Image (spheres, grey):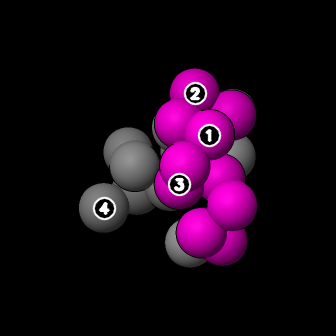
Amino acid sequence: RVMFRDMALNGKIPGVKKASW
């Protein structure tokens, strides 16, 4: 799931960003 990882890195998903994918 590279898309989710990219979104998290960009900070589009605050919850996922802290999850450290």
Q: Amino acid at mark 3?
A: Val
Indicate the position of residue 4 as horizontal and vertical percent values.
40, 49
Q: Which residue is mark 4?
A: 1
Q: Is residue 14 left or right of residue 3?
A: right
Where is residue 6 shown, x and y percent of the image?
A: 55, 44
Mark 2 or mark 4: which is in front? 2
- Mark 1 / mark 4, whichever is N-terminal: 4
Between the C-alphas of marks 4 and 3, the distance is 13 Å
Secondary structure at badge 4 equals loop
**Magenta residues (range):** 11-20
Location of mark 3 (residue):
16
Residue on which disc 2 sits: 12
Q: Is residue 8 visible?
A: no
- Counting other residues with Cα less than 10 Å from the Cα at mark 4, is it few (<14), some (14-19), or many (20 or more)? few
- Which residue occupies 55% across, 49% down? 15
Determine contact: label 3, label 1, CB under 8 Å.
Answer: yes
Neighbour tally class for label 3: few under 14, some 14-19, many 20 plus, Cα within 10 Å: some
